[in-house]
């Protein structure tokens, strides 16, 4: 599956979409869900929680293993996707549609430091070897 | 990656698009797509597992029964009919579990053992040492020239019969926990899933062809991921997780495999009889949302315990576990499990959780 060009990425396999109003939508990448396998449990951060960059804030669990999701940048959680919590398998079906939470970034410019699609592609390829 | 050991079916798994992982030094398929779908296939149809990483070991000689009487905790004298199988632990002097194994009685000069992959070398060294120390004069032959395929599920007999024309006369007569040998082919009605099925050994070079025939007959490839959820639902112990050299079989849910009724002197017996049993292996079902995993701490009214194996059960659609907890905690009681920063409620249950496709809890 190709890596969407319009998103930003972290080395810990989160994707980030900058919305028109400046909020950030966060999910885990197709590659991440492929590594984890069938999802069975997702726990999102509470709305209103303030996160530091890199802070553990959500948990995604497959049959195989539990994995932490990290805040891609500092900010405040403004929405959490309850639908993925009740249907964790939606992350396997389409990782870029099944978002986890939305952040209002403390500093919008922080997003620029994240990986672009080409950078993330390189990272995934380097991990495969 | 290149130093990983490969089974004779390695190329077959790759052709099928399996996700391969390092499983204790073996390059093995963890799934061929969806682990949960594979799990359901075994509960409702027929799944095929490559279990060639496990080691068949032939023990031959005049003293083989006497040797096994001393070597293992279960009593091989329960094996009187050719082909009959016995599950047992092999203990060290301290009563810890060196390995769990299946013992097939073929004739008075030949027993076949099947041991775990990760412990195979250690087991062989231990057995050779006892063989020498006790002056048994036996020949122990590791059978790496054999491949082993497990065919499991309610449809297993039909699939095997169709894949091997003429085998139906054998499968029809084969009772659970019995095996039959025909030349180098060995068919056992055993498994690790809680379903009906077979574990078949064939010469390594025949394995890819046999696997293909089983798939053409409707068997679906199943990875080690589903193998783990299936065995846990079936309440079967996994060596290295639910018991090891530091744990007693009597605190691992395996008292039923330890024969203390006869006077037989076996390795580890003295230690077992002189040590107090304070823990038990219990089943847990998580009542809150989350997933139980090994090493999570369990709080009970009699003190702490620990999860030894935990997973999400695809059949029950909730999380289940085996946990070593203090004695005196009974099925039906609630306990708390520490998961990350939370304490979640779980219920103690009798296991197995699932047998022959049906939920038991």
Image (spheres, coloured by chain):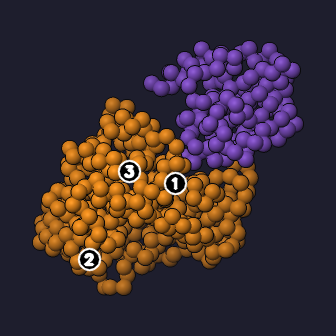
Chain colours: A purple, B orange
Quadrant in which the C terminus of chain B is drawn: bottom right
Q: Name the residue under label 2.
A: B79
Which disc is residue B40 wearing?
1
Residue sitting at x 64%, y 63%:
B285
Residue density around tag 2, few if under 14, some if 14–19, many if 20 or more, within 10 Å: some
Say left or right for A65 vs B146: right
Chain-order first, disc 1 or disc 3: 1
Q: Share a chain, discs 1 and 2?
A: yes
Task: Work out whether B196 lies above or below B120.
Answer: below
Question: Number of labelled discs?
Answer: 3
Residue density around tag 1, few if under 14, some if 14–19, many if 20 or more, within 10 Å: some
Do residues under tags 1 and 3 come within 8 Å of each other at their CB atoms? no
Residue density around tag 3, few if under 14, some if 14–19, many if 20 or more, within 10 Å: many
Residue sitting at x 25%, y 44%:
B209
Between B39 and B249, the residue placed more toward the observer is B39
Between A108 and A88, the residue placed more toward the observer is A88
Do residues under tags 1 and 2 come within 8 Å of each other at their CB atoms? no
Residue sitting at x 67%, y 74%:
B332
Give residue B203's position: percent from left, percent from top.
20, 50
Marked residue chain, label 2: B
Identify the element where label 2 is drawn: loop
Give residue B1's position: percent from left, percent from top.
37, 31
Say left or right for A48 vs A61: right
- The residues tagged by marks 3 and 2 sit, at their Cα atoms, a distance apart of 34 Å
**Residue B25 in view of the camera:** no
- The residues tagged by marks 1 and 2 sit, at their Cα atoms, a distance apart of 34 Å
Chain-order first, disc 3 or disc 2: 2
Q: Name the residue under label 3.
A: B218
Say left or right for B125 vs B360: left
Residue sitting at x 64%, y 69%:
B348
Give residue A86's position: percent from left, percent from top.
73, 47
Chain-order first, disc 1 or disc 2: 1
């Amino acid at each position: 599956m190709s890596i969407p060009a319009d998103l930003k990425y972290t080395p810990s396999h989160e994707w980030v979409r900058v919305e028109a109003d400046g909020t950030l939508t966060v999910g885990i990448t197709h590659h991440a869900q492929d590594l984890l396998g069938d999802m069975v449990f997702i726990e999102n951060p509470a709305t209103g929680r303030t996160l530091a960059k890199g802070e553990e804030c959500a948990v995604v669990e497959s049959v195989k293993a539990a994995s932490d999701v990290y805040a891609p940048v500092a900010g405040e959680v403004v929405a959490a996707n309850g639908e993925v919590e009740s249907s964790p398998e939606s992350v396997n079906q389409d990782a870029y549609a099944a978002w986890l939470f939305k952040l209002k970034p403390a500093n919008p410019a922080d997003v620029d430091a994240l990986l672009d699609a080409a950078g993330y592609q390189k990272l995934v390829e380097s991990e495969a070897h | 990656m290149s130093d990983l050991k490969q089974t004779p079916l390695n190329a077959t798994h790759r052709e099928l698009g399996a996700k391969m992982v390092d499983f204790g030094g073996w390059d093995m398929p963890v799934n061929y797509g969806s682990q949960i779908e594979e799990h359901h296939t075994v509960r409702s149809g027929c799944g095929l597992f490559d279990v060639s990483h496990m080691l068949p070991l032939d023990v031959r000689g005049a003293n083989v029964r006497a040797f096994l009487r001393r070597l293992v905790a279960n009593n091989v004298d329960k094996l009187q009919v050719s082909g009959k199988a016995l599950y047992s632990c092999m203990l060290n002097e301290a009563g810890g579990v060196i390995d769990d194994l299946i013992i097939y009685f073929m004739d008075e000069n030949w027993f076949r053992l099947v041991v775990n992959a990760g412990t195979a070398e250690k087991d062989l060294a231990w057995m050779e040492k006892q063989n020498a120390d006790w002056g048994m004069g036996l020949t122990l032959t590791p059978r790496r020239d054999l491949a082993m395929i497990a065919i499991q599920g309610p449809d297993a007999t039909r699939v095997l019969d169709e894949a091997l024309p003429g085998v139906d006369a054998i499968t029809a007569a084969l009772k659970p926990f019995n095996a039959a040998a025909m030349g180098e082919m060995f068919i056992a009605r055993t498994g690790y899933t809680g379903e009906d099925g077979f574990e078949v050994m064939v010469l390594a070079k025949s394995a890819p062809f046999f696997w293909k025939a089983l798939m053409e007959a409707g068997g679906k490839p199943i990875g080690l991921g589903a193998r783990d959820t299936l065995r846990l639902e079936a309440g079967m112990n996994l060596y290295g997780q639910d018991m090891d050299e530091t744990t007693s079989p009597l605190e691992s849910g395996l008292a039923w495999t330890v024969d203390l009724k006869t006077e037989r002197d076996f390795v580890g017996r003295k230690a077992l009889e002189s040590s107090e049993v304070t823990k038990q292996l219990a089943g847990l079902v998580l009542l809150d949302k989350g997933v139980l995993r090994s090493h999570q701490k369990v709080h009970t009214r009699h003190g702490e315990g620990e999860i030894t194996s935990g997973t999400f059960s695809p059949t029950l659609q909730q999380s289940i576990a085996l946990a070593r907890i203090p004695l005196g905690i009974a099925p039906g009681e609630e306990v708390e499990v520490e998961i990350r920063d939370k304490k979640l409620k779980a219920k103690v249950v009798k296991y197995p959780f699932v047998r022959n496709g049906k939920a038991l809890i």
